[in-house]
Amino acid sequence: EPEVTQTPSHQVTQMGQEVILRCVPISNHLYFYWYRQILGQKVEFLVSFYNNEISEKSEIFDDQFSVERPDGSNFTLKIRSTKLEDSAMYFCASSLRPGQVHGYTFGSGTRLTVV
Amino acid sequence: SQKIEQNSEALNIQEGKTATLTCNYTNYSPAYLQWYRQDPGRGPVFLLLIRENEKEKRKERLKVTFDTTLKQSLFHITASQPADSATYLCALDLDNQGGKLIFGQGTELSVKP
């Protein structure tokens, strides 16, 4: 069954450093998403991306965050200057269209720890 | 204020019984409601989706109901197995074209042999 692949699985970074989280969505999917889950809390929407532009973003997704689809297969989330409170699991997801028929396919996540 | 709430406590049931999980929401008008399974340290896995004009949906041992008047969805697992032990998340899809899901906090289900 097709999968969404995320790398790295774990990332430890110093506060103030830039991080890039990488995702390879399912190949024929057109819509891409980033969510995050702080330990013990809900899964929270960050951003959706379609046709090489952001479709929607949450309040969390401020100027420190950016997304990019640099080639035909990768989808990245960049955090420019990490803060302690950015520590969380970050999940990439994709769908053929907004998940109104088949839901969304999530990756296994990147655990980001900011120290 | 807008809220989405699931059974706050963990649910412990005996193998073979039916597990029923609840998702309640206020001040939302979702077009769709989705249920996901999440295992520790893993991403959510899509299980079922139900539309606002559907009352019930089934898939194998899973059944979802959706009552837009009560603003509630129930998720049932019949003939439960230890392998069903996981956290189950409900998520609202407001059909705003951006694909944003609003998740509940999840209910942890434990099925004992």
Image (cartoon, coloured by chain):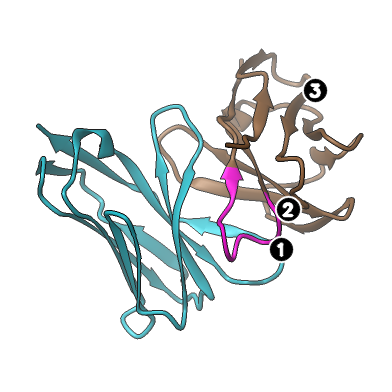
- Residue A105: percent from the left, percent from the top? 59, 45
Q: Amino acid at mark 3?
A: Glu
Numbered label attached to residue B98: 1
Crowding at mark 2 (Cα within 10 Å: few <14, some 14-19, many 20+): many
Q: Amino acid at mark 2?
A: Ser
- Residue B105: percent from the left, percent from the top? 39, 49
Q: Amino acid at mark 1?
A: Gly
Q: Say left or right for A34 vs A54.
A: left
- Let me know if residue B95 is in the magenta part: no
- Give me the residue at 31% from left, 81% from top: B70
Which SS class for mark 2?
A: strand
Give above or below for B100 relative to A81.
below
Chain B's shade in the image? Answer: cyan
Q: Which residue is mark 3?
A: A18
| Chain at tag 3 | A
- Mark 3 vs 1: CB contact within 8 A: no
Chain A's shade in the image? Answer: brown
Give above or below for A115 relative to B70.
above
User: Between residues A103 and B12, which one lies in front from this camera angle?
Assistant: A103
- Mark 3 vs 2: CB contact within 8 A: no
Q: Which residue is mark 2?
A: A48
Residue A35: quarter of image: top right
Numbered label attached to residue A24: none
Mark 3 or mark 2, which is nearer to you? 2
- Give me the residue at 67% from left, 18% from top: A8
- Mark 2 vs 1: CB contact within 8 A: yes
- Give me the residue at 61% from left, 34% from top: A90
State which region is magenta.
A95-105
How far apart, in angstroms, are the residues tagged by discs 2 and 1? Answer: 6 Å
Residue B5: quarter of image: bottom left
- Residue B40: percent from the left, percent from the top? 39, 29
